[in-house]
Image (spheres, rainbow, N blue to C red):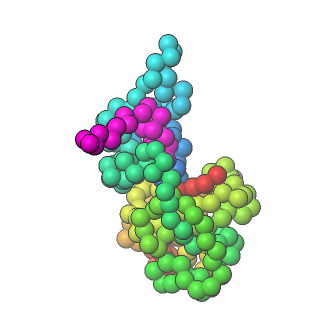
Amino acid sequence: MVKQPKAVRPLTHGQVWAALDRLAERAGLSPSGLAKRAGLDPTTFNKSKRITGDGRERWPSTESVSKALAATNASIETFVALIGDGGRTGQAVPMIGFEQAGTAGLFDDSGFPSGKGWDEVALPAIHDEHAYALEIEGDQMKPAYREGDIIVISPGTPIRRGDRVVLRTAGGEMLVKELKRRSARTLELGSLNPELADRILDAEEVAWIARIVWVRQ
């Protein structure tokens, strides 16, 4: 009996757009925020742009996908993994409330989670063995993050200007900010809450800094 080859399912319009949405989530961005970071028109990845006025499916261009990957430091292999259900295959990472994160002994000198008191949560694969999650408490970071949101931090992911970051000062203060500028001497940090002032820290004041790569809201 001749074995019939397994049917190959074609890539769908929905899978590609879902992968772009997940790529944005991993970077802590909305679809429009991802497009803007990639140097595209902010509406490029909006849901309203995915179907034409006459009902036809509009696919993202390979150029726009390439720019989105470059903007998030992601590989084509990562994008393929985000397509379909495979994009939700995850890993368990340590998690703790943001207010508790300032407690001594929960991080080592490199900013990796350590010690006791951590819970665990299953989230999309981050590809960083030192990744961890913080649960937002209070409204200090609105409108970017609200109470109950979970942000995932990857100490191993490179940081660039415009990234949202978590950092710990030498004095033990935990901050969630946008990195506006970084030099050998100082860090300029933008507040996520427009009612709060931006900060400038001397480099020697920063114990460690890591990038936020995903948010669950």
Q: Is residue 21 above or below residue 171?
A: above
Q: Nearer the viewer, residue 122 or 36?
A: 122
- Residue at the image position 50 percent from the left and 17 percent from the top: 55
Q: Nearer the viewer, residue 217 or 203?
A: 217
Q: Quadrant of residue 181?
A: bottom left
Instruction: Please indicate, yes or no, whether residue 40 appears anywhere in the rendered image.
Output: no
Is 10 colored magenta in this rendering? yes
Magenta range: 1-24
Q: Quadrant of residue 135?
A: bottom right
Residue ranking furthest to the right:
138
Q: Is residue 106 above or below residue 194?
A: below
- Residue at the image position 41 percent from the left and 64 percent from the top: 127
Does 103 sit left or right of 177 as displayed? right
Does 151 sit left or right of 184 as displayed? right
Instruction: Please indicate, yes or no, whether residue 118 appears anywhere in the rendered image.
Output: yes
Is 133 colored magenta in this rendering? no
Q: Is residue 78 above or below residue 188?
A: above
Q: Is residue 91 above or below residue 119?
A: above
- Residue at the image position 40 percent from the left and 51 percent from the top: 81
- Residue at the image position 59 percent from the left and 82 percent from the top: 106
Is the N terminus in the top left, top right, bottom left or bottom right quadrant?
Answer: top left
- Where in the figure is residue 212, as x and y percent of width and height? 51, 61
- Where in the figure is residue 172, as x and y percent of width and height? 60, 80
Total marks drawn? 0
- Where in the figure is residue 65, as x and y percent of width and height? 36, 39
- Where in the figure is residue 186, as x and y percent of width and height? 45, 69
Q: Nearer the viewer, residue 36 or 149?
A: 149
